[in-house]
């Protein structure tokens, strides 16, 4: 055996836990945990590439006990069971390491440490060098002139002097050191009261445990703190000390049926590695496999042949900068040449550069196009800076590109294509043939992921993009993109279009293979993107005067509340300051502390104030103040500033990827959070008005999530109640309380409503008791009675938990998936939260799929109605329309029919339709 390179012995069991707790909570495309898989593989590969070992082994603890457990039944008894999220990663780790050609060792009856110790001593006897990779301090006892330790987490190497520097004692005394101070991680008792400093001091004076007990009377004469007390502790715990010595001693004479000579790595199986890396989503390593750079150590052998059926993992990364054909279009001839290419292609990617992210008012700065990987162009339109080259006119560009963009037969791809559609619509181009959106492809595959281009390029293509911030930052100053020179913008913009094309080629094959996800993408999310774009462009008419008047009213109310609060507090303070509020509530007024912040200060969040408000006036007034201030700052002050001068309307942005369940969200302004249950919120909705000759029509799905629950659980009582159009909350109250529906009081109905909706969000008896202000035992009675009357609901919930834990995800009726990486967590809080999400997501996600389907069906019908109806808002389970007054009866009947019949459940869908001059009246 050559001694040119050390024998590397890896403590695989140590690696497992260190990688698991040190690595972020990574997941693969199926939502399964991968942090430990990535961490262990990465550490071992780095070690191999650094040391190029000719002999290596990864050693794991065998299942079952060890001889130490027989000596001391409490050995490692305080260790928690392996977290489920780690347990499921062990087998994939073993499989990857085997495919890398690395010998894996497990010996029954002993621990990994003992196998490593035996192999190290065998090698040392042959005067061979050994490098042990571990994070466990007990391994320091093995260090010698030929044996060193390396901690791969921080790359620190320990030789004999390094052990002394770290622990204060040489390797020969490490066992004594551990015997004295114990080891809480393994539940080795040691001598109670003897810590690291005392142990080091004792072993400086004595040769070890035996020497200490042979000269025990000398201990109290040592110049160490509490020497007399230390002696007594040693005397009282001699049995424990000697037991600890046995437990801490690594066996170096384990009977092994192999030798170090047999620890040569085998040829790595690249095909298996490729398959496993694809499954786990390790795209950077896939690229390195393809480029033959995964293994840098020449002692690791790989097949010289290519990977079976291999395609370039990242065409972008495999291309050199010289092979990328990016050009700025500055002449008519260049543009004509690209128009020919676009007419001849079947699909191209496009992107726009604009002056802002406000889709209704932003101006075009340029357009980028890509038809093949590494081939793209940028057409600058409005760049303004000193020395800017002459650009083509906007008229010429639109004249030549408009027919291409409006040709349905030429398919297009974008990243957040809704925005680009809106921008080009501002210039009279109605883009047709939009087939794919890479942002939505990523979202449908796994809604938990990040779907921005920079993150996706890194994850799927192992490519670091030029970011917008990097492009527009010049000498610590931020400039707008129209002031960036065309040469730099060309690289940025062409890369965006190029990456979009490459991402589609990466994502679509995976999506296309999953029939339900393919349908969800192609028949719901993609068509919806353009519908939302048109809704955003339509906007909603706003009564600015009404909002200004309401803002003044709120200002007066806030001033009055502020005075009341200060009078009640006995002093003037800043109500918006949590610090000052803490002093007023908990120091001056001595209110009970309900909850603390991570820093240990009393919390003043809404939940705390709400609980305190049940018994104290001051927190109640502060809550009211906060609510009114939020309405004023967010809506009555801000909305008038957002009214467009073009059409006197507000144009929100609908976010298709804003929630993991499929629900739409909106921003600038956020229409989802305008209160509907209090007078001040309704006054804001009164400012959303119909234009002259039109009415606002609100169509709202009634109790849609409860209806979905009835369908999913197939509970007979629930199915019958909805089939007979019962008041479900009154019916539930009558079932729980065993009384007729006629006799149910309004308060009893309110409580039943809280139960109906609370349970589908996983509410506990404690949560219900707080929400409806009843004792917990009474809340428990409500919940227990509910499940007695609706037993299939409880069965559905339990089955959903089990299925989610098995699969790692749950699905809506349309096949939309929500991956739950914490569903197998050993942390009970994380696991319960994941279980609550598992129960609610199929209902909330199916409700999202239903209203999206309704919007698509509505849009098809609206196109035949001219200007008689416009779909202007989507909020939760509600669609809002502008409808011509003289068509109101016919159209509202059709709205109700389309929405109620767009999706089939085993219970009828019900839509409540309201009509008014403003949104509040209609709702």
Image (spheres, rainbow, N blue to C red):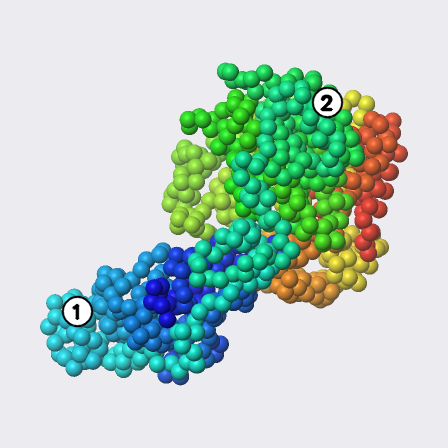
Q: Residue at coordinates 59% horizontally, 60% vertically from top-left? A: 271
Which secondary structure lies at badge 1? Answer: helix
Say which of marks 2 and 1 sits in front. Answer: 2
User: Which sits earlier in the primary sequence, circle 2 or circle 1?
Assistant: 1
The image's mark for residue 204 is 1
Which residue appears farthest toward the right when viewing the image? 890
Distance from the alpha carbon under mark 2 to that under mark 1: 87 Å
Quadrant location of residue 915?
top right
Q: In the rendered view of the protein, which quadrant contains the C terminus? A: top right
Decide if residue 622 is on the left or right side of residue 915: left
149 relative to 912 in the view: left or right: left
Query: x, y (%) of residue 499?
Result: 60, 39
Residue furthest to the left in view is 221
**Residue shown at the point (41%, 65%) measured from the top left:** 54
Residue 541 in picture, x, y percent from top left: 71, 25
Helix, strand or loop status at disc 2: helix
Quarter-wise, where is residue 732 in the image?
Answer: bottom right
**Residue 414 percent across, percent down from the top left:** 66, 36
- In terms of image quadrants, where is residue 514? bottom right
Looking at the image, residue 342 lies above or below residue 109: above
Nearest to the observer: residue 556 or residue 99: 99
Label of residue 400 in the image: 2
Q: Nearer the viewer, residue 656 or 453?
A: 453
Quarter of the image where the N terminus is located: bottom left
Q: Is residue 14 above or below residue 634?
A: below
Identified at 40% across, 77% down, the residue is 259
């Amino acid at each position: 055996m050559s001694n040119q390179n050390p024998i590397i012995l890896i403590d695989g069991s140590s690696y497992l836990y260190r990688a698991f707790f040190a690595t972020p909570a990574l997941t693969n495309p199926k939502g399964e945990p991968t942090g430990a898989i990535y961490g262990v593989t990465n550490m071992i590969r780095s070690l191999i590439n650094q040391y190029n070992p000719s002999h290596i082994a990864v050693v794991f603890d065998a299942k079952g006990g060890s001889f130490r457990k027989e000596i001391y039944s409490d050995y490692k008894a305080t260790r928690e069971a392996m977290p489920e999220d780690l347990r499921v990663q062990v087998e994939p780790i073993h499989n990857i390491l085997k495919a890398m050609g690395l010998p894996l060792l497990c010996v029954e009856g002993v621990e990994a440490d003992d196998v490593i110790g035996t192999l190290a001593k065998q090698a040392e006897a042959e005067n061979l060098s050994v490098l042990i990779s571990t994070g466990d301090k007990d391994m320091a006892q093995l260090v010698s002139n030929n044996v060193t330790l390396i901690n791969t987490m921080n790359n620190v190497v320990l030789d004999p002097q390094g052990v002394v520097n770290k622990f204060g004692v040489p390797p020969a005394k490490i066992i004594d050191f551990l015997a004295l101070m114990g080891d809480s991680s393994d539940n080795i008792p040691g001598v109670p009261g003897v810590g690291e400093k005392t142990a080091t001091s004792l072993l400086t004076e004595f040769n070890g445990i035996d020497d200490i007990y042979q000269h025990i009377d000398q201990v109290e004469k040592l110049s160490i703190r509490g020497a007399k007390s230390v002696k007594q502790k040693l005397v009282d715990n001699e049995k424990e000390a000697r037991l600890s010595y046995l437990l801490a001693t690594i066996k170096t004479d384990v009977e092994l049926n192999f030798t170090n000579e047999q620890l040569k790595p085998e040829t790595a199986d690249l095909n298996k590695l490729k398959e496993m890396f694809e499954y786990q989503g390790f795209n950077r390593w896939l690229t390195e496999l393809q480029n033959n750079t995964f293994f840098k150590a020449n002692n690791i052998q790989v097949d010289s042949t290519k990977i079976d059926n291999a395609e370039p993992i990242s065409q972008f990364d495999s291309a050199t900068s010289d092979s990328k054909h990016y050009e700025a279009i500055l002449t008519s001839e260049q543009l004509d040449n690209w128009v020919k290419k676009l007419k001849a292609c079947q699909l191209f990617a496009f992107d726009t550069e604009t002056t802002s992210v406000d889709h209704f008012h932003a101006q075009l700065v340029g357009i980028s196009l890509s038809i093949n990987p590494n081939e793209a162009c940028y057409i600058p339109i409005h760049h303004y800076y000193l020395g800017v080259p002459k650009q083509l006119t906007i008229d010429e560009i639109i004249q030549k590109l408009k027919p291409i963009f409006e040709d349905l037969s030429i398919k297009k791809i974008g990243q957040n294509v809704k925005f680009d559609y809106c921008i080009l619509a501002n210039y009279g181009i109605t883009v047709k043939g939009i087939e794919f959106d890479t942002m939505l492809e990523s979202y449908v595959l796994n809604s938990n992921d990040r779907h921005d281009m920079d993150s996706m390029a890194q994850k799927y293509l192992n490519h670091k993009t030029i970011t917008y911030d990097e492009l527009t930052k010049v000498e610590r100053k931020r400039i707008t993109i129209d002031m960036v020179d065309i040469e730099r913008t060309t690289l940025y913009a062409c890369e965006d279009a190029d990456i979009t094309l490459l991402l589609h080629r990466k994502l679509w094959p995976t999506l296309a293979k999953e029939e339900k996800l393919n349908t969800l993408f192609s028949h719901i999310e993609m068509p919806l993107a353009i519908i939302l774009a048109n809704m955003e462009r339509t906007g909603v008419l706003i009564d600015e005067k009404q909002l200004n008047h309401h803002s003044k009213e709120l200002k007066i109310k806030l001033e009055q509340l502020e005075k009341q609060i200060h009078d009640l507090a006995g002093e003037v303070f800043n109500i918006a300051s949590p610090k000052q509020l803490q002093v007023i509530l908990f120091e001056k007024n001595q209110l009970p502390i309900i909850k603390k912040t991570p820093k240990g200060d009393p919390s003043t969040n809404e939940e705390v104030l709400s609980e305190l408000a049940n018994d104290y006036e001051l927190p109640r007034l502060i809550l009211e103040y906060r609510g009114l201030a939020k309405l004023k700052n967010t809506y009555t002050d801000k909305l008038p500033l957002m009214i467009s001068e073009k059409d006197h309307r507000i144009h929100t942005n609908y976010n298709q990827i804003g929630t993991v369940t499929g629900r739409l969200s909106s921003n600038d302004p956020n229409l989802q959070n305008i209160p509907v249950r209090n007078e001040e919120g309704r006054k804001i909705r009164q400012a959303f008005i119909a234009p002259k000759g039109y009415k606002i029509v609100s169509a709202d799905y009634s109790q849609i999530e409860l209806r979905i629950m009835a369908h999913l659980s197939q509970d007979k009582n629930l199915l019958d109640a909805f089939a007979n159009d019962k008041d479900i909350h009154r019916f539930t109250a009558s079932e729980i309380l065993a009384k007729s529906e006629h006799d149910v009081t309004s308060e009893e109905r309110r409580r039943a409503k809280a139960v109906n909706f609370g349970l589908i969000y996983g509410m506990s008896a404690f949560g219900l008791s707080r929400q409806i202000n009843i004792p917990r035992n009474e809340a428990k009675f409500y919940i227990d009675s509910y499940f007695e009357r609706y037993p299939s609901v409880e069965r559905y919930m339990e089955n959903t938990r089990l299925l989610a834990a098995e699969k790692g995800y749950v699905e809506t009726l349309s096949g939309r998936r929500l991956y739950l990486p914490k569903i197998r967590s050993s942390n009970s809080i994380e696991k319960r939260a994941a279980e609550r999400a598992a129960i609610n997501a199929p209902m909330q996600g199916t409700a999202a799929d239903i209203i999206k389907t309704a919007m698509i069906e509505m849009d098809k019908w609206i196109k035949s109605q001219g200007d008689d109806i416009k779909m202007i808002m989507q909020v939760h389970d509600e669609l809002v329309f502008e409808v011509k007054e003289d068509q109101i009866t016919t159209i509202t009947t059709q709205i109700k029919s389309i929405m109620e019949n767009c999706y089939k459940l085993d219970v009828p869908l019900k839509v409540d339709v309201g009509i008014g001059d403003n949104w509040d009246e209609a709702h």
